[in-house]
């Protein structure tokens, strides 16, 4: 029984088999391109996607990263950390949502962080927008040394400590 999108197995020597495989390849390739476009992955955004993953250079209790050249978020999964650059400032966040520890994701098309487990959302500065999280994203102390950002990972700064949380950023 055929369902319309299935095809009979081809003999490798038949030209029709190669044609059918090329058609399948093109159909699947076009679907993948369509999905990228639907997600907003236009060429200028593809460049931003390329820089979303990085690993900091560890020196004792500190991690060192190059200063980002454009606004956006750099995810360091190995060190459970996010470096975000927005409006002339850099902030280092804990990768985990403050609600239940699920890793947050950067949504460039919405200019926000998102926790997929309970749908909490956060502004680029880590402030809570909505969801089950009861506070903003936790930050780390950060400073600039030349062309590097230096993040101290020994203590998380919660948004409930408003003064320390507001200070845990650096002007660029």
Image (tube, rainbow, N blue to C red):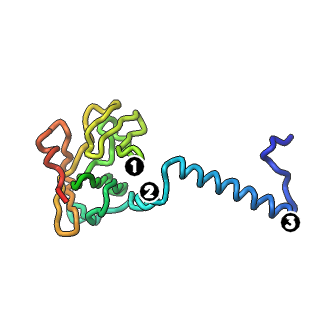
Would you say 71 lies left or right of 47 here? left
Looking at the rendered structure, the secondary structure element under dot 3 is: helix
Q: Quadrant of the N terminus?
A: top right
Looking at the rendered structure, the secondary structure element under dot 2 is: helix
**Residue matched to label 3:** 15
**Which is nearer the N-term, disc 2 or disc 3?**
3
For disc 2, the neighbor class at 10 Å (few under 14, some 14 to 19, many from 20) is: few
CB of mark 1 within 8 Å of CB of mark 2?
yes
Which residue occupies 43% across, 61% down? Answer: 47
Task: Find residue 113 and report its image quarter.
Answer: top left
In percent of width and height, residue 137 lies at 27, 42
**Which is nearer the N-term, disc 1 or disc 2?**
2
Would you say 40 lies left or right of 145 here? right
**Residue matched to label 2:** 45
Give whichever of 77, 34 is nearer the camera: 34
In percent of width and height, residue 64 lies at 24, 64
Task: Find residue 89 and report its image quarter.
Answer: bottom left
Q: Quadrant of the C terminus?
A: bottom left
Checking the image for residue 76, the label placed there is none
**Residue matched to label 1:** 108
The image shows residue 40, relative to residue 43, as above or below, that is above
Would you say 86 lies left or right of 35 here? left
Q: CA distance from mark 1 to mark 3?
A: 45 Å
Q: CA distance from mark 1 to mark 2?
A: 8 Å
């Amino acid at each position: 029984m055929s369902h319309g999108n299935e095809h009979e197995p081809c003999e490798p020597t038949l030209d029709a088999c190669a044609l059918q495989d090329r058609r399948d390849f093109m159909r699947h390739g076009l679907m993948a391109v369509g999905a990228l476009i639907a997600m907003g992955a236009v060429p200028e955004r593809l460049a931003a996607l390329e820089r979303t993953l990085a690993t900091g250079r560890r020196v004792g209790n500190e991690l060192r990263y190059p200063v980002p050249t454009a606004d956006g978020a750099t995810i360091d999964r190995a060190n459970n950390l996010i470096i975000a650059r927005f409006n002339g400032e850099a902030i280092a966040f804990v990768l985990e949502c403050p609600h239940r520890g699920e890793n947050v994701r950067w949504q460039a098309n919405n200019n926000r962080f998102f926790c997929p487990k309970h749908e909490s959302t956060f502004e680029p500065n880590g402030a809570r927008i909505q969801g089950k999280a009861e506070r903003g994203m936790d930050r780390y102390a950060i400073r600039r040394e030349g062309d590097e950002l230096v993040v101290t990972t020994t203590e998380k700064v919660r948004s409930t400590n408003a003064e320390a949380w507001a200070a845990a950023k650096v002007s660029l």
